[in-house]
Image: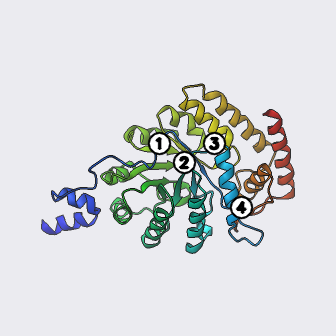
Amino acid sequence: MEATRRDAMGLMGGAAAAAAMGGPAMAQGARNLGSKTKTLFWVASCTPCDKNLKFDPAAFKDVLAWFKHNGADGVVVLGTTGEYPSFGMAERKQVMEVAGKNKDGMNIICSSGTSNFTETIELSKHAADHGAEGLLVIPPYYYKKPALAGLVKYYSLLFDAVPQSLAVNLYHIPSNSAVPISTDLLKALKHYPNLAGIKDSEEDMPEYKEFVANFPDLNMRTGTDTKLEYALSKGMGAILAEGNLFCRQIADTFAAFRAGKDSHAPFMKFQAQQTLLRKLGGEIDSYGPMKYALSQQMGVPQFYQRPPNLDATEAQKAAIRKGLAQIKEMG
């Protein structure tokens, strides 16, 4: 019986173990969501590289200023759109440092996940020391179908290692990671007061509704624009890759919602402009074309992505320029 109890404690983080033993638990006090309000808009930022495929700090500084100017509440650094698997540890730290120094009041969430807990913890602590309000942490993604207890252990090691002032969000993107974030996992980790919520990047509306219904006190952010209006209706935020090219349009949607005004009209304007750009054949959902389009919007030299993602073709570039001109005429 005692051995079983010790095994159970080993699968729990320090806070859960303390609570089970009758000791002080981390769950005392208010929950840290990483922001004062939940209905905020974070851009899932790209990471600009120069022609030699090196991270371009000056270009990233300009990108951050562009997002701020166009109304973003925050930025997610080095997420999927930020190509985090394509950057080494030292590079990821450099990207976070540039973001922290140039956030200009925006809320910074750093995607610090790796396939191992030692590097994830190292990057998470570094983010805390360089201006991040929160983390976005993908589950360990090499081993398929890991047991719930293994995922609880993995995330508990992280929670026990980082300060409670750092909000931790779990990254639900099984289409990439092959490891979903489940309601059981969230429930097992909820005793940590800095479990802030998730980013749900899947297109499964019933599943998202279940997340929101089970965790109304967390920020169950949508990672897709198709779930945005529902998320806002339930008081949730969003982390959107679409914010790279449609930052002002999405920011206007959030601003209208928070002001108690019609948020559907700016949302539909955003949808119409996005549909236009997609139909013209610019392939703006791919890294190279998206980065080319953003550099065109900003009026700066083109910045680049890393292999295996490819640059925009000349045909795509022409389609993007045509679409951006039409969008500008639309106002």
Give the residue displayed 16% in from the left and 59% down from the top: 21
Q: Residue furthest left?
A: 1
Q: Are marks 1 and 2 in contact (CB under 8 Å)?
A: yes
Q: Check disc 3 and report its element: helix, strand or loop.
A: loop
* Residue 66 on image: x %, y %: 69, 50
Work out whether residue 26 or residue 289 is closer to the camera in this orientation and state it: 26
Q: Which residue is labeled 2 in the image?
A: 202
Tag 1 or tag 3, which sits nearer the N-term? 3
Q: Nearer the viewer, mark 1 or mark 4?
A: 4
Tag 3 or tag 2, which sits nearer the N-term? 3
Q: Which residue is labeled 4 in the image?
A: 59
Looking at the rendered image, the quarter that the C terminus falls into is top right
Q: Which residue is labeled 3 in the image?
A: 71
Residue 78 visible (yes or no): no
Residue type at the position of mark 4: Ala
Residue type at the position of mark 1: Glu
> Whole-Å distance between the Cαs marked 1 and 4?
37 Å
Q: Are marks 4 and 3 in contact (CB under 8 Å)?
A: no
Tag 4 or tag 1, which sits nearer the N-term? 4
Q: Are marks 2 and 3 in contact (CB under 8 Å)?
A: no
Give the residue displayed 43% in from the left and 73% down from the top: 118
Dot 2: within a 10 Å radius of its alpha carbon, few (fewer than 14), some, or many (20 or more) residues?
some
Give the total number of marks visible in the rendering: 4
> Whole-Å distance between the Cαs marked 3 and 1?
29 Å
Q: Nearer the viewer, mark 2 or mark 3?
A: 3
Q: Nearer the viewer, mark 2 or mark 4?
A: 4
Residue type at the position of mark 2: Glu
Q: Which residue is labeled 1 in the image?
A: 207
Q: Is 95 placed left or right of 66 in the picture? A: left
Dot 4: within a 10 Å radius of its alpha carbon, few (fewer than 14), some, or many (20 or more) residues?
some
